[in-house]
Image (cartoon, grey):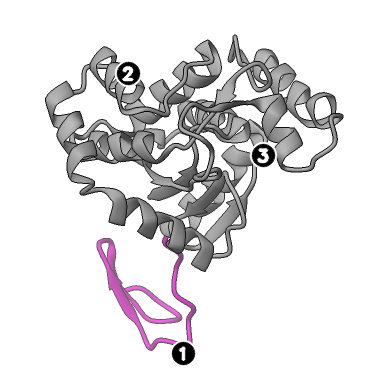
C-alpha cells in the first residue's frame, strides 16, 4: 500500500502530520508494509532568500495579527500534547524552500527520503532552523549524513527542479489547494491535517480496499452431487 504525502518544510500542519503519520503507522498492524512517498508542495517560493519572520509573513499576506493566537499557537499546543516538543510555529523564520526540496529529492534517490523529510521538519520546527540558502541546506545535509558533495551537485545542476515542479502540478491536478495533502493508494485524498485516530482509520480503510478478504462465491444452481475427502454424496444419501 502507498501513501503519497505532499508538504512543504515550512508548513506547521505538515510537520505535525509527519509526526502523526509515524504514530499511526506504528499502531497499524501492517504498518511495515505501507510505503510513504514524500512529494513537494512549495508554499512561499517568492520569499526573500534571507527569510522573514512568521509575524512578518502574516502582515505580508494581509492576514490579521490574531492568526498567531487563533491558528499557530493551537498547533504548538497540539504538538506538545502529542509528544512533539519543542515545536515552534510562531517564533521562526520562513524562506523559499526550493533548495531544501532539491536536497530532499536527492535524499529520496539515496533511499533516505522519509527519514530526511522528518529530520528537516524537526530541524526547522524544533530548532527554528533556517534552510533557505545553499550553505544552510548543505550544512543540514552533512549533519544528517548525506554526502555533501552529492548534495551540492544536486543544487548546482538543478536536476531535481523538474521533479519538484511536477510534484506540485500533480497535487493541484488531484485537487490540492495547499498542504498537507495525502493520497492513499491513488484512491482517495485527505486535504489538510487530521488527528492520529482519524488518520489510522483512513489507513485501515485504504488497506482493506487494497487487501479484500476473500469471500465465498454465490451459488447460482443446485448440484446433483459432490465428492469430498470423506466421500461422495447426493442430496439424500452418501455413497
Q: Which residue is mark 2?
A: 140
Q: Position of residue 163 (x, y in %)?
A: 30, 54
Vertical placement of residue 79 versus 102, above or below? above
Q: Which residue is mark 1?
A: 221
> Camera-side residue: 122 or 164?
164
Q: Is residue 123 visible?
A: yes
Q: Secondary structure at mark 2?
A: helix
Vertical placement of residue 146 versus 196, above or below? above
- What residue range appears in magenta? 214-239
Q: Residues within 10 Å of mark 3 (few under 14, many from 20)?
A: some
Looking at the image, is mark 1 or mark 3 nearer the viewer?
3
Q: Position of residue 83 (x, y in %)?
A: 60, 12
Does the stretch in magenta take in 148? no
Query: In which image quadrant can residue 135 be found?
Result: top left
Q: Secondary structure at mark 3?
A: loop
Residue at left offset 44%, top offset 62%: 170
Residue at left offset 25%, top offset 62%: 229
Precedes in sequence: disc 1 or disc 3 = 3
Q: Main secondary structure of the magenta part?
A: loop
Precedes in sequence: disc 2 or disc 1 = 2
Q: Residues within 10 Å of mark 1 (few under 14, many from 20)?
A: few
Q: Which mark is residue 194?
A: 3
Precedes in sequence: disc 3 or disc 2 = 2
Amino acid at each position: 500500500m502507498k501513501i503519497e504525502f505532499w508538504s512543504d518544510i515550512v508548513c506547521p500542519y505538515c510537520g505535525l502530520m509527519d509526526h502523526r503519520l509515524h504514530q499511526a503507522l506504528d499502531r497499524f498492524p501492517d504498518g511495515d508494509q505501507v510505503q510513504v512517498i514524500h512529494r513537494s508542495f512549495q508554499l512561499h517560493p517568492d520569499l526573500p532568500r534571507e527569510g522573514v519572520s512568521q509575524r512578518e509573513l502574516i502582515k505580508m499576506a494581509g492576514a490579521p495579527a490574531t492568526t498567531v493566537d487563533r491558528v499557530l499557537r493551537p498547533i504548538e499546543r497540539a504538538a506538545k500534547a502529542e509528544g512533539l516538543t519543542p515545536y515552534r510555529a510562531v517564533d521562526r523564520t520562513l524562506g523559499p524552500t526550493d533548495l531544501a526540496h532539491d536536497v530532499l529529492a536527492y535524499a529520496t534517490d539515496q533511499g533516505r527520503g522519509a527519514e530526511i523529510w522528518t529530520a528537516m521538519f524537526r530541524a526547522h520546527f524544533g530548532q527554528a532552523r533556517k534552510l533557505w540558502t545553499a550553505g544552510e541546506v548543505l550544512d543540514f545535509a552533512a549533519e544528517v549524513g548525506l554526502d555533501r558533495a552529492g548534495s551540492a551537485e544536486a543544487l548546482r545542476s538543478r536536476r531535481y527542479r523538474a521533479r519538484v515542479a511536477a510534484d506540485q502540478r500533480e497535487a493541484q491536478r488531484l485537487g490540492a489547494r495547499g498542504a498537507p495533502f495525502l493520497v492513499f493508494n491513488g484512491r482517495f485524498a485527505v486535504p489538510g491535517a487530521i488527528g492520529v485516530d482519524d488518520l489510522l482509520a483512513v489507513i485501515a480503510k485504504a488497506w482493506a480496499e487494497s487487501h479484500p478478504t476473500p469471500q465465498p462465491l454465490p451459488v447460482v444452481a443446485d448440484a446433483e452431487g459432490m465428492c469430498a475427502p470423506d466421500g461422495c454424496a447426493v442430496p439424500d444419501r452418501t455413497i
